[in-house]
Image: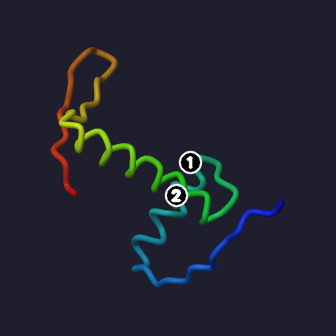
């Protein structure tokens, strides 16, 4: 059974498009849609964690942590 899809068309600034293309190359995505899907998955996970009261941090290789404040 085929997945139901909805076609979405939107405009974005050239700088944003360039950033999306750079990400597409970096993650070896096969399409623009794959970049957007992966970004939505990550964004949703970050929102879910902050709604639970958790903090988002990145730990560098040397153990230093950077705490990110929610922007949503």
Q: Which residue is farthest right?
A: 1
| Residue count near mark 2 (Cα–Cα under 10 Å), binned few <14, some 14–19, many ≥20 | few
Q: How far apart are labels 2 and 1 at the CA level?
A: 6 Å
Q: Which residue is farthest top?
A: 62
Residue drawn 63% across the image and 76% down it: 6
Please state if 34 lies on the left or on the right of 71 as rendered.
Answer: right
Q: Which residue is farthest front?
A: 1
Residue drawn 56% across the image and 48% down it: 26
Tag shown at residue 22: 2
Please state if 62 lies on the left or on the right of 38 as rendered.
Answer: left
Q: Nearer the viewer, residue 15 or 65?
A: 65
| Percent of width and height locating residue 4 | 70, 69
Judge whether 65 appears above or below 68 on screen.
Answer: above
Where's the C terminus, which quadrant?
Answer: bottom left
Please state if 31 lies on the left or on the right of 38 as rendered.
Answer: right
Judge whether 61 appears above or below 2 on screen.
Answer: above
Mark 2 vs 1: CB contact within 8 A: yes
Residue drawn 43% across the image and 78% down it: 14
| Percent of width and height locating residue 27 | 58, 46
Tag shown at residue 54: none
Where's the N terminus, which quadrant?
Answer: bottom right
Residue under label 1? 26
Q: Quarter-wise, where is residue 68 in the image?
A: top left
| Percent of width and height locating residue 30 | 70, 57
Q: Nearer the viewer, residue 29 or 25?
A: 29
Q: Secondary structure at mark 2?
A: helix
């Amino acid at each position: 059974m085929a997945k139901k899809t909805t076609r979405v068309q939107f405009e974005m600034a050239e700088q944003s498009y360039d950033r999306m293309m750079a990400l597409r190359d970096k993650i070896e995505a096969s399409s623009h849609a794959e970049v957007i899907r992966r970004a939505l998955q990550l964004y949703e996970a970050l929102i879910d964690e902050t709604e639970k009261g958790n903090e988002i941090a990145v730990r560098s290789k040397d153990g230093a942590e950077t705490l990110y404040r929610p922007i949503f």
